[in-house]
Structures are given as structure tokens and as C-alpha cells.
Amino acid sequence: MSPSLSPFHICSRFAACWRAVGAFRRAIALRLVVACLLAPGLAAPALAMQVALALPQAGGVHQVFAEALQRALAGSGHTLLAAGNLADGLDQAVLERADVIIAAGSHTAATVLDRFRRPTLAVMLSRGQWEALRTRHPQAAVSAIFLDQPAERQMRLIAAVLPRGSRLGLLYSSESGEPDPELARAAAGAGLKLVSEGVAQAGEVIGGLERLLPNVDALLVLPDPVLSASNPARSILLTSYRFRRPIFAFSRAYVEAGALAAVFSTPEGVALDVADWLRKSGTGASAGRLPPARSAASCEVAVNRQVARSLNIGVPPDAQLQALVQGGAS
């Protein structure tokens, strides 16, 4: 028998062929898996996460944020878990197993950081509240998307309404800390002068305004843990109206209550920001990292035209203001 036809050589050749076919099939299978993962609409995030959402209470603007985040994360691969709220109780088991916690409101974020050692993103809070939170938990893995608008964004709105050289008053509480120096720099860049007045508690609001308002042309109101409460806010509106000074505020509700105009970020806009970060997380150098603390990327503008007419102030159309505030026009 020819050596090439011996049972040993036949079996060896058959085994080699089988191994080659197996390797080929494995290579094809691997390529199919990679193709499926890279196909548009089919790719899962590089790091699908368990995302726990903690709220201060059920309902209100925080519930609007929660529902918007749920919609924005649909199809992302991440799992959004309801972790309860401060009023009815937080779900400890959910919070302990989460890859990241989204805490809405400063009190929620403080409670979460006190009790759980998980990466936490605080939302729906002021910049002052964020800075206090960071001071209280200097070693924690925590960041924030706060409600305060960038100084340049605010000053673009105000400069579109007030003439150059106008004096802009700012009332702040000692609890929120000294105003961000960037406000004064942005005001100067917009041709405005910022004049600040601090108060220690809510009962000093009217006195502070009576010292401030005679020396300014308008008032800037920022999110503040003391001044944003209902009674101080009412005093700010009534006293400013008595002095006939327009208010530039931080929410649509403030404008509807009597402020002249506001630039603000909505709960839905903040939710889109959070969802955008989560969709990008786990990729490249950003894997597993919290985003830097900042204002929300998107904003809206509201104007009370009735107040504008009452104070005889000309205000550009909403669309023009929106473009100016976003920096898309000059």
C-alpha cells in the first residue's frame, strides 16, 4: 500500500482538513458577531450600566425630569432604576448595587452621599448648593449639572434689553456664598456694571433691596437656597415693582410671576444632558468617569411682555433673543 494511502496518512489529512474547516467557520462566526455589534441601531453601549434615580419627593419638576430621563434612555442599553425619594423612603438595595446614582435636588444628593459610596451625579440644584456639597464631601466621586446659567449666557440676554452702561443689581444670601467673579467679568464684557448686595437671612430681603435698587437699573435673581423660597421671592417681586426695576430671573415661573425675562434650563433639557453623558460613558478615555460639573448645555428664554409694556422697555422678539443667548447671532 502506498504510504500516502495508508490509514494513518488518510486520518492525518482528514484531521488537518477538519481543523482548517473549523478555523474557517470560527472566523466567519467571529466576523458575523463583530458586524452585528457595529451595525447602526444594534450596538450596545461599551459599558451598559445600572443607573439609580433618587428624587426628593414624588411629583413636581423632579418627576418631570425623571420621566424625561426615562424616555431619553430608551434603547440605550442602560437600565434606569427607581430608587425612591426622600419623602417616602429611598431604596437602599437599588442604591447599593447601582453603577451610578442620579440624585435630583441638593438634599437628595447630600443624603445619598452621606449613606452610599457610589459615583453620584447631582442635578436640579444651584451652583452654590453644588459647591457646598463638594466642600462637605471632598473625597466623594460626585459631579453635577446645576441650574445656574453660564455668566456669558445671562449677560447676553440682559445686554439685549438694557442699554450699555446700565447698572445691574445682584441680591444674594450668605448661604449661597459670594457671587461668582465671572459674573462681574461677563457683565463688564457686555457693557454692564454689576452691583452686589448680600443678606444673611430671608427677613433681610426687603432691607437689602431698599439699599440696592435705588442704585441700579435692573435686578438679576439667581437660584439661591434662601432667596428662591416663596416668601423671599414674593418680596423681591413686589419691592422691585415698587421701585420700577425690571427683574432678570432663572425660570419661566419667575417670569410668569412678574419678572421681565429669564434664561433657564428645563428639567427635560437637563435629562437630555444626563442621557447624552450616559450614552457616551464607557467609551475611550471617558470610561467610567463622571462628567465635569457644569451648567446644562441647552437653555430657553422667556419674556413677560406685559411687564415690558408696563415699564416701557423694548424687548427683541423671542426668536432673536434665543439666538443671541445661544451665541448664534450678534
Image (tube, rainbow, N blue to C red):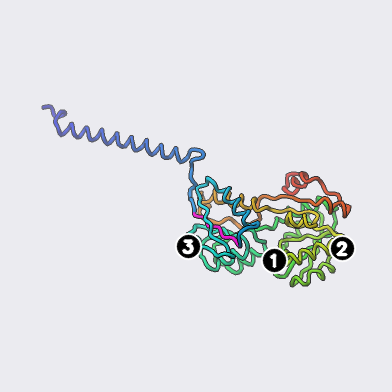
Of the numbered discs 2 and 3, the one sitting upstream in the chain is: 3
Of the numbered discs 1 and 2, the one sitting upstream in the chain is: 1
Q: Nearer the viewer, residue 5 or 56?
A: 56
* Residue with the mark numbered 2: 242
Q: Is residue 51 magenta?
A: yes
Q: Is residue 222 magenta?
A: no
The label number, if any, that marks residue 53 in the structure image? none
Q: Amino acid at mark 3?
A: Ala
* Residue with the mark numbered 1: 225
Q: Check whether the beta carbons of the residues at disc 2 and disc 3 lie within 8 A of each other.
A: no
State which quadrant residue 196 falls in: bottom right
Q: Amino acid at mark 2?
A: Arg
State which quadrant residue 320 falls in: top right
Residue 149 location (% of width, % of height): 70, 56
Q: Quadrant of the N terminus?
A: top left
CA gap between label 1 and label 2 equals: 24 Å
Q: Secondary structure at mark 2?
A: helix
Q: Secondary structure at mark 1?
A: loop
Residue 87 location (% of width, % of height): 59, 65
CA gap between label 2 and label 3 equals: 53 Å
CA gap between label 3 and label 1 equals: 31 Å
- Position of 193 with respect to 110 (left or right) is right
Which range is magenta?
Answer: 50-56
Q: Quadrant of the C terminus?
A: top right
| Chief SS of the magenta region | strand
* Residue with the mark numbered 3: 93
* Residue in view at x 65 percent, y 61 percent: 125
* Residue in view at x 41 percent, y 39 percent: 33
